[in-house]
């Protein structure tokens, strides 16, 4: 009983806990005030909780503090022992190392799924055949949406299994055009553009560039469909990706999300050409993604950073269509992309 209570204290969101909050945790395990007080005093004596002196104590007998400080570092020891116990019991392919640095609540949330995965591995071991995410998800936990929509991908990565389970992502195919003159190169460049208009404008110039492909991003779709690249373009080479999208909060966010999947640089010659034009007002409704803009701006020089920051704060933006077809094609052909 005390172990269950201490586990809930370890999961408690704050470092201090009121007597009322403590009662809600302990109440399911006791029937009388005396039993409740005995349990609280036992936790006090063990050092798991400590009275916050400034809040005082009740006048009831036995007397309890109105507020306690939770010593979570003591509770963590039990948490780590539990992780070690499970590590010794689970299939050898399941690794729990990452949980030692995370809140116990994450382990508690993931544990039921990990036990199901353990059961699957003990029966089938690691798969030899590649399988689509919904099918593998159904095999592992009995829910076809768990990997793609239920946080399963993150759980599998935490326990070191995502790559080993040979999962094919289910996403729309990646749309791109190929420059046949460059497909045999050992180092290849690929340009991803956000919008259809820009894709169509650049397409006639593709074979006159140093790029191997022109990829149509379809807005946010590319964030998932880029996972198909190696299967749709199974050519061994050093692949370098560039991205060009609208200069607005959404466009920056798409680039940032994509950069979390693959190394991809902003296509600076296009963005810098936009900055020479007059911006457009609108899209104030778009929500800024706090971590995206600083990462995006790190590719620009100081003056450009200031201009881009002021632009987005003031509700202005540059659509890709700011650049005319001839300008897009000229920039793509004539810019230095390899230095």
Image (cartoon, grey):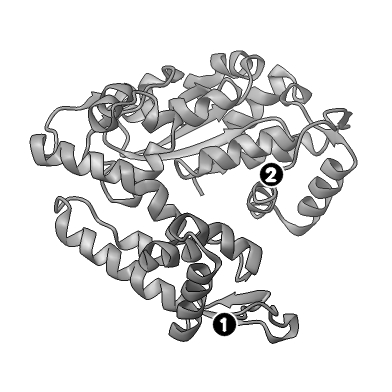
Of 198 and 248, the residue lying toward us: 248
The mark closer to the camera, 2 or 1, is 1
Which element type, helix, strand or loop, lies under badge 1?
strand
Q: Residue at x 64, y 38 (%)?
A: 253
Of 234 and 207, the residue lying toward us: 234
- The answer to whether 211 appears left or right of 306 in the picture is left
Residue 299, image x, y percentages: 64, 52
Give neighbour class at mark 2: few <14, some 14-19, many 20+ (Cα, 10 Å): few
Which element type, helix, strand or loop, lies under badge 2?
loop
Q: Is residue 209 visible?
A: no
**N-terminal of the two: label 2 or label 1?**
1
Q: Is residue 287 visible?
A: yes
Q: Residue at x 75, y 37 (%)?
A: 287
Q: Residue at x 74, y 80 (%)?
A: 55
Question: Looking at the picture, does residue 184 appear above or below residue 111?
Answer: above
Residue 263, image x, y percentages: 46, 45
- The answer to whether 161 appears left or right of 105 in the picture is left
Q: CA distance from mark 2 to mark 1?
A: 40 Å
Looking at the rendering, which quadrant does residue 20 occupy?
bottom right
Residue 1, image x, y percentages: 36, 63
- Pointer 1: what residue? 50
- Pointer 2: what residue? 289
Q: Residue at x 29, y 64 (%)?
A: 82
């Amino acid at each position: 009983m005390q172990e269950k209570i201490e586990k809930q204290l370890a999961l408690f969101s704050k470092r201090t806990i009121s007597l009322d909050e403590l009662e809600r945790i302990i109440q399911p395990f006791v029937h009388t005030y005396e039993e409740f007080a005995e349990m609280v005093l036992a936790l006090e004596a063990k050092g798991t909780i400590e009275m916050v002196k400034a809040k005082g104590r009740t006048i009831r007998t036995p007397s309890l503090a109105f507020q306690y400080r939770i010593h979570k570092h003591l509770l963590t020891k039990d948490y780590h022992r539990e992780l070690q116990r499970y590590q010794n019991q689970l299939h050898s392919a399941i690794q729990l190392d990452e949980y030692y640095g995370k809140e116990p609540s994450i382990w508690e949330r993931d544990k039921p799924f990990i036990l199901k995965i353990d059961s699957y591995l003990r029966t089938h071991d690691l798969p030899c055949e590649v399988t689509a995410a919904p099918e593998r998800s159904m095999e592992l936990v009995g829910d076809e949406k768990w990997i793609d929509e239920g946080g399963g991908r993150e759980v599998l990565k935490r326990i070191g299994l995502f790559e080993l389970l040979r999962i094919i992502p289910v996403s729309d195919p990646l749309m791109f055009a190929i420059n046949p003159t460059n497909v045999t190169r050992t180092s290849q460049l690929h340009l991803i553009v956000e919008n259809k208009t820009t894709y169509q404008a650049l397409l006639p110039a593709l074979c006159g560039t140093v790029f191997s492909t022109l990829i149509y991003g379809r807005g946010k779709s590319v964030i998932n469909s880029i996972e198909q690249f190696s299967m749709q373009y199974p050519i061994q080479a050093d692949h370098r990706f560039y991205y060009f999208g609208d200069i607005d909060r959404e466009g920056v966010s798409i680039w940032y999300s994509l950069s979390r999947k693959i190394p991809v640089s902003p296509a600076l010659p296009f963005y810098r050409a936009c900055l020479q034009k007059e911006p457009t007002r609108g899209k104030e409704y778009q929500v800024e993604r706090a971590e995206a803009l600083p990462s995006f701006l790190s590719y620009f020089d100081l003056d450009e950073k200031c201009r881009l920051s002021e632009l987005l704060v003031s509700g202005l933006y540059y659509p890709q269509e700011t650049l005319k077809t001839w300008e897009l094609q000229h920039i793509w052909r004539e810019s230095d992309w390899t230095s």
